[in-house]
Amino acid sequence: MIPTSEPSRDDPARASELDAVVTVAPTPSPGSRQPRRRNSLLRAKRPARERQKKARLELLHSMTKEERREFLIQETAEKEEALQRLQRAAAADSSSQRIAIDLSFDSIMNDKEIRSLANQLKLSYGSIKQMPEPFQLVFCNPSEELEHSLERFGASNWFIQWRRGAVSVAKHFSPEELVYLSPDSPNVLEQMDPTKIYVIGGIVDKSRKKGASLNAATEAGITTVRLPIQEHFTERLDHILNVNTVVDVLINFRELGDWPRALDIALPQRKRSNIGRKAIRRRQKQQMLQTTCAETQSKGSACNVKQHLPNFDSTELPESELSPIEDLSLWLDRD
């Protein structure tokens, strides 16, 4: 249950309870210190949530007792207010923008991908919790395995809508009010309609199941659109995003009303770059081979590019792309 009243600042019992949150960890004696480990590796693996907790405790330790008390009371009130906003957004009669996640793709995912999807759904809910006017989040047709995985994060206590027991999201809503976001759609999303329900396919595309969400939407008679990534990141070959990244893009567009800024903020570094990681590696390999050939030719020998790539198979690249060997040959011809 969510408290409806703000905690009193004059309540000594509440204040003492809040003060008890801050505890100073004892400093280990020199003799009890653990052997030095690879701190950089540990920091890299430490979850962001743990780093946030540490930063919060450091901030609290830097405050006076009164400042700490005021900070904790305000923090508690803000959390309660945020939960109340979520509760209002999740109500059946809410007028909030609705975002539905189609979770009926378990049959084409393995156990690891289902666990990854559960984590993405947790991140999506976390982003929506921070909104001043939260979306209404709807989970459609989750499997028992996915729900079990979600329960690790306490999903049964989330303020969201659940729709179960159907093979398609169109069984829960009228197809006319649904808009399915699919990276394979030929249509581009330009504006968000508050009367529509935007559906995101709950698929972890480790094996690139191309067209799965588009086919599901087409079979159900649902309009499809895609995010305008290709229009603003023209050199990107891969426009597949995690569920939580799509939610973040929609949140940013809702707040900013500007696709370039919304995409630039929400997309991870590997997606924001105008040149993907594969293209970067390919160009680095081209530059390395060009340097090698130039050195070989300076010694009066002929340059055989293929001998420097004994394990390279050009058939691995899409037909629309030149292999590093073919691309380098063009460079050498121009010289």
Image (tube, grey):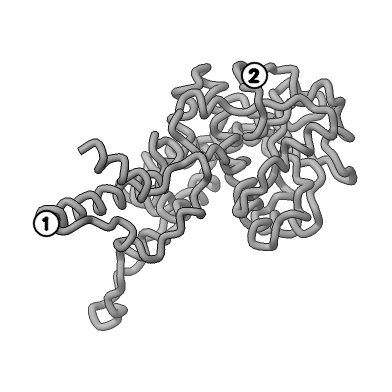
Residue 100, percent from left and from top? 73, 34
Horizontal and vertical percent position of residue 241: 56, 40
Residue in the image at 74% along x and 21% along y: 196
Q: Report whether 325 appears left or right of 294.
A: right
State which quarter of the image contains the C terminus: top left
Identify the element where label 1 is drawn: loop
Which one is nearer the viewer's eye here, 236 or 49? 236
Residue located 46% across and 59% down the image = 313
Q: Position of residue 85 (x, y in %)?
A: 65, 29
Instruction: Report the label total.
Output: 2
Residue bearing the label numbered 2: 192
On the image, the x and y values in percent for residue 283 come to 32, 45
Q: What type is the residue that disc 2 sits on?
A: Met
> Which quadrant is the N terminus positioned in?
top right
Label 2: few (<14), some (14–19) or many (≥20) C-alpha neighbours in 10 Å: some
Q: Is residue 69 visible?
A: no
Residue type at mark 1? Gly
Helix, strand or loop for disc 2: loop
Residue holding disc 1: 300
From the image, state whether disc 1 or disc 2 is nearer to you: 1
